[in-house]
Amino acid sequence: MRISRIAGEGIHSLGLHKLRTFFMMAGTIVGVAALVVIMAIGKGTERKVMKRVQNFGPRAMMLIAGGGKDLPPPDMTVTTLTLEDVEAIRQQVDGLEIVAPQAWRFDMDLKHENAQTRAVIWGVEPQWHDAWNWPVIEGDGITPDDVATMARVCVIGTAVKRELFPNQDPLGKDLYVNKVRLTVKGVLEHKGVGGMGGAGEFDNRIILPITTAMRRVMNVDYVGAIRIVTQDAARMPRQAEQIRDLIHQRHHITPPQEDDFRIITPTVIAEIARGTSASLSILLIALAVLSLLVGGVVLMNILLISVAERTKEIGLRRALGATRRDVFVQFLAESLAVTLLGMVLGSLLGLGVSALLPRLTPIVAVPSWEPVALGLGFALLVGLFFGVQPARRAARLHPVEALR
């Protein structure tokens, strides 16, 4: 009997037991769908990492107050960085394009007439706009005169504009920060949701001259961070070491003392993001593989039950001339058909979920055909591995014993 005909009979028998067939392929559907979604999320995460590095700035570094190795959240209670450190870096480290200090406070009350909101306050120097590639789209930015005179002025993000000045032009209007009156002189370009170190929505902030922020609003003599842009990204590792050595010297830090600052580079940003996503991906891929294995075990057990239920059918086929090989091929074909159909349905389900995720959640997923090919390989392995035992048992049935 031809193998194609035998395999066709095996597949036909699956159609006669639709519910049983569905349960046999359920594990494969879930496992392959999970694999497709996980790999789509992995590709999306890689894009997010690259976008985050681009947003951070490929030639930028952040020197942040406070020790540790991870990305902080920024903390203005740490007093270890000063404007004197800023000047030392400017004078002693070559090849730097911008060295821009910034003082910050989070979740501060803002008020304009009867409107109120809470926002991030950043005290900055004029170079801040270039350091973060964040231009002003209305009015003017912070100027050297603003810093020199501790001017009571500010530039607001679009979210602040929306909350405090919903139906009016904010330029020239006053707002209050902790009872300090500031005049709005500009509006920042829209950036969206994000923010380094948990700063939240990019646009929910105002910037003001660093002297105004430190002396009039915050009453501090230290900064939270220093934004540094190098002229050549290739020199950044060496410059980061020079800055580290300089701050060690200025802060009298010697081993084994822990640093009272952190240097964040694009490499650090990418490593942290990739490390977090890699750990999660490994866990999810393990769960997907486990689902496939569990599905394989379920498939094998249901096929074994099927062999027991179809003993007389097998005996009759053997009595009519079917060989052990014929019976083996039939049941193995059933196993492979179940897993391949499960792979197809699981792939379609996974691609559909991957396409819907970005629309319904903040998760970025990029569907692709690579996991479908991988799912095909897994499905074939599962079908072969877990289908062999039931097929062998069916093939070994003696026709006389089977017909009793």
Image (spheres, rainbow, N blue to C red):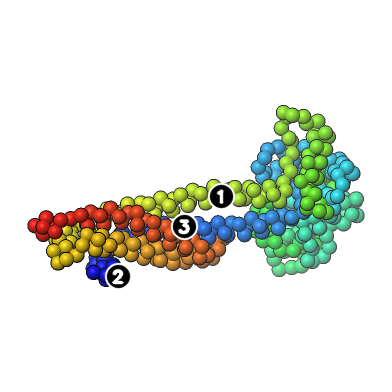
Q: Secondary structure at mark 3?
A: helix
Along the viewing direction, whichever of 371 and 157 lies nearer the viewer: 371
Q: Which residue is mark 3?
A: 35
Q: Secondary structure at mark 1?
A: helix
Q: Secondary structure at mark 2?
A: helix
Percent position of residue 171, x then y: 80, 64
Percent position of residue 79, x then y: 76, 37
Q: Is residue 164 depicted above or below 213 in this figure?
A: below
Q: Which residue is mark 1?
A: 278
Count the numbered circles shown: 3
Q: Is residue 307 left or right of residue 205?
A: left
* Mark closest to the chain's N terminus, 3 or 2: 2
Looking at the rendered image, the disc whose residue lies closer to the viewer, 3 or 2, is: 2
Is the Cβ of the residue at disc 3 closer than 8 Å to that at disc 2? no
Percent position of residue 138, x then y: 79, 66
Q: Which residue is mark 2?
A: 4
Residue located at (23% from left, 69% from top)? 1
Q: Is residue 362 left or right of residue 17?
A: right
Along the viewing direction, whichever of 89 and 122 lies nearer the viewer: 89
**Disc 3 packing (10 Å; few <14; some 14–19; many ≥20):** many
* Mark closest to the chain's N terminus, 3 or 1: 3
Quadrant of the image for the C terminus?
A: bottom left
Q: Amino acid at mark 1?
A: Ala
Residue located at (84% from left, 63% from top)? 140
Taking the view exactly as shown, the residue that stands out farthest to the left is 404
